[in-house]
Amino acid sequence: MDQRRKGARLVALALLGFVLFNYPFLALASDERRVLGIPILYAYLFLSWAALIALVALVVRKSE
């Protein structure tokens, strides 16, 4: 994978992170319900954060 495509994918992931951690999605997750005893907001934040890290690792590793 060339550097331009890698850079474009990393920028797209940064924009995805911006969208995931912005108002509309956080408002959807800010509910009193719980999943396995964990508030939905905390589960959403942790899982989306972990998914972004995994996707960045995948993009960086694929380029090597």
Image (spheres, rainbow, N blue to C red):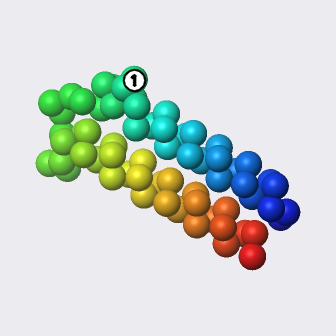
State whether residue 33 is above or below residue 4.
above
Q: Label 1 amino acid?
A: Pro
At horizontal 55% and vertical 40% (from top left) the residue drawn is 16
Relative to residue 19, is residue 23 drawn left or right?
A: left
Dividing the picture into quadrants, the one containing residue 32 is: top left
Q: Secondary structure at mark 1?
A: helix
Residue at mark 1:
24
State whether residue 9 is above or below residue 34.
below
Relative to residue 32, is residue 19 drawn left or right?
A: right
At horizontal 58% and vertical 58% (from top left) the residue drawn is 55
Tell me if I can see residue 10 in this picture: yes
Relative to residue 22, is residue 38 drawn left or right?
A: left
Relative to residue 26, is residue 19 drawn left or right?
A: right
Query: Which part of the image, by quadrant, shows the C terminus?
Result: bottom right
State whether residue 49 is above or below residue 32.
below
At horizontal 48% and vertical 38% (from top left) the residue drawn is 18
Task: Give the image location of residue 3, x and y in percent.
Answer: 80, 62
Task: Give the image location of residue 1, x and y in percent.
Answer: 83, 64
Mark 1 nearby-residue class (10 Å; few <14, some 14–19, many ≥20): few
Q: Nearer the viewer, residue 48 or 13?
A: 13
Question: How many numbered discs?
Answer: 1
Q: Please, which residue is most extreme toward the bottom here? A: 64
Q: Nearer the viewer, residue 7 or 26?
A: 7
Dividing the picture into quadrants, the one containing residue 27 is: top left
At horizontal 80% and vertical 54% (from top left) the residue drawn is 5
Tell me if I can see residue 35 in this picture: no
